[in-house]
Image (spheres, rainbow, N blue to C red):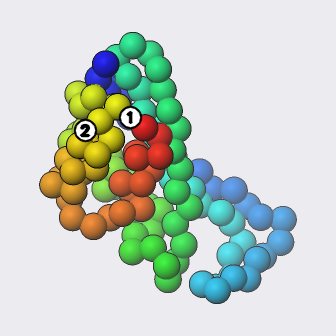
Amino acid sequence: MKIAKIEIFLVVVPLKKKTEGAHGVISEQKSVIARVWTDNGESGLGSVDPRAKYDEDTPDEMVHILRNNLVPAVIGEDPLRIRRIVDVMDLAVPRHYGAKAAIEVAL
């Protein structure tokens, strides 16, 4: 079994009311979702919810890193060898842990 395709989505959900937390006030929830497909048709979903002043990347930056660096690096890998895939992602681009987490959770 191999990773055949990974779809990346940015989802923006407006909140009914503004919410204040330790990292500021938000009026919408932005989530980055990764859907990993294997060559035998199985799939998994992973998501991360980046927060300003907490995560190093914005949601848009995560999407860019995923599509341009991380997805190409892991296509063809065995989805059951998660530790190896994390190592491959680390070699492809240092840091960017939130973007990597979307794929890792999907696996």
Q: Determine the residue positioned at 44% across, 16% down.
A: 41
Q: Camera-side residue: 82 or 55?
A: 82
Q: Determine the residue positioned at 27% across, 29% down.
A: 78
| Circles 2 and 1 in contact, beta carbons < 8 Å | yes
The 10 Å Cα crowd at callout 1, few under 14, some 14 to 19, many 20 or more, is: many
Q: Is residue 101 left or right of residue 71?
A: right
Identify residue for label 2. Answer: 74
Label 2, label 1: how many angstroms apart (C-alpha)? 9 Å
Q: Nearer the viewer, mark 2 or mark 1?
A: 2
Image quadrant containing the C terminus: top left
The 10 Å Cα crowd at callout 2, few under 14, some 14 to 19, many 20 or more, is: many
Identify residue for label 1. Answer: 6
Q: Position of residue 45 (x, y in %)?
A: 52, 38
Q: Position of residue 70 (x, y in %)?
A: 27, 48
Q: Quadrant of residue 65?
A: bottom left
Q: Which comes sooner in the sequence, label 2 or label 1?
A: 1
How many numbered badges does the structure rendering display? Answer: 2
Please, what is the three-letter code of the amino acid marked with disc 1? Ile
Q: Determine the residue positioned at 47% across, 46% down.
A: 105
Under circle 1, the secondary element is strand
Q: Is residue 61 above or below residue 18?
A: above
Q: Is residue 33 above or below residue 36?
A: below
Under circle 2, the secondary element is helix
Q: Determine the residue positioned at 52% across, 66% down.
A: 50
